[in-house]
Structure formats: structure tokens, C-alpha cells
Amino acid sequence: MAHNVHRLQEVEWVTTTSLLKTLAGKHKTSVNTIVKKHKATRSVNGKNYRVFEAKAERKGKEPLTTHFGAVPLIRKPESHITDKIATPRRQRAELLQRLSSDECEMCGKKGKLEVHHVRKLKDVNKPGRKTKPAWVQRMASLRRKTLMTCEACHKDIHAGKHRSEWDSWKIVLESRVR
């Protein structure tokens, strides 16, 4: 429907150039080598287009083929636009649910929460390393980089005053029994 479809040629050039440079960088070669290797033509509505094509040969089957290009940039005045109204999400994000529960995930105390965040949990369960503090093990078991804690637990984490795993779970269990 647009009257300035020709402006999309700039976008096409940028995306094609980006693709070729990315492939050249990945294969540690020049853009010209990639162009020569993957250059092909495709016909759409009787008009030939230059494309870049990759084929993967398979035993006993047709080769897998994919291409980039051959999209006619022409105006279609008869096209129809249908606006779709986005429906709001019904479920709250898990992080929001954990935060709105107002319960410390370390000691089980109700009240105002603070969020403790770490960059990565990659090295938590590696063999041969000393045992991690309870809060790290808790985050690893939740598979989350955030932990909802009360102010006291959050200060303890930053101060290096770590309870053992059993003490933390004992406190959580006792608070839930009451």
C-alpha cells in the first residue's frame, strides 16, 4: 500500500551486506568469496532475482536448500490491513509472584522484601569445590539468579554471615508450622 516502496531497497541492501559480512567473518574469508560461492538466481512472477543460496547434500534424499532474497519490492494497492488488538497477559510473571508473596525465601519471615541478585550461577555445583553458602544453594535449587529476602537476610548475605543449609531450612520449616 505504501507509495515509497522503493525505500525498502536500502533496507534490502543493508540486510544483504550484513548477511554476507557475517558469513565472511564466520568462515574467515572475504565477502567476495562468499558471494562467488553462494550466488544464484531465482524467478518470481517471471522476473529473475539474484539470491544467495546454501545447499546441504544428503544421502538418498534431496539436498536441503535455503536462500536469501527473491522478494519482489512492488506496490500492492489492493492489499488489506487488518489491525489486531493485543490481548493482555493474564498470568503475572514468576518474579512478580515471588515478590508479591511478601515471604523471605531464606527464613520464611513475612514483610517487606529486598531482591538479592547475582550475575551467574554457573559454577555452583562443580565437584571438588568447597560447599557454597545456603543462599547460593537455594538460588541454584530454584535455578534463579534472584532471591527474595528480608532485610536481615539480605544484610547477612552481603556481610558474609552465612547460615548452614540445615539451619536455613530448619527456620523455614519452623515458620511454616506456626
Image (spheres, rainbow, N blue to C red):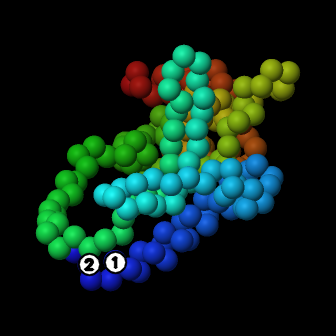
Residue 7 vs residue 154, the one in the foreground: 7
**Label 1 residue SS:** helix
**Residue occupying the point 58% across, 24% down:** 58
**Looking at the picture, which amino acid does disc 1 mark?**
Val
In the figure, is residue 83 to the left or right of 17?
A: left
- Other-residue count near label 2 (Cα within 10 Å), few / some / many at <14 / 14–19 / ≥20: few
**Residue occupying the point 83% across, 26% down:** 130
Quadrant (top left, top right, bottom left, bottom right) of the C terminus: top left
Residue 96 vs residue 10, the one in the foreground: 10
- Residue 160's spot in the image, x, y percent? 76, 44
Q: Quadrant of residue 140?
A: top right
In the figure, is residue 11 to the left or right of 161?
A: left
Which residue is the extreme one toward the bottom? 4
Report which residue position mark 2 lands on: 2
- Residue 49's spot in the image, x, y percent? 46, 61
Asked if marks 2 and 1 touch (Cβ < 8 Å), the reply is yes
- Residue 12's spot in the image, x, y percent? 49, 69
Quadrant (top left, top right, bottom left, bottom right) of the N terminus: bottom left
| Rendered view: 60 above or below 17 | above
Does the rendering let one see residue 163?
Answer: no
How far apart are the alpha carbons under marks 2 and 1?
6 Å
- Residue 126's spot in the image, x, y percent? 77, 25
Which residue is the extreme one toward the front? 46
Does the rendering let one see residue 31?
Answer: yes
Report which residue position mark 1 lands on: 5
Q: Quadrant of residue 48?
A: bottom left
Which residue is the extreme one toward the right? 128
**Residue occupying the point 65% across, 47% down:** 118
**Looking at the picture, which amino acid does disc 2 mark?**
Ala
**Label 2 residue SS:** loop
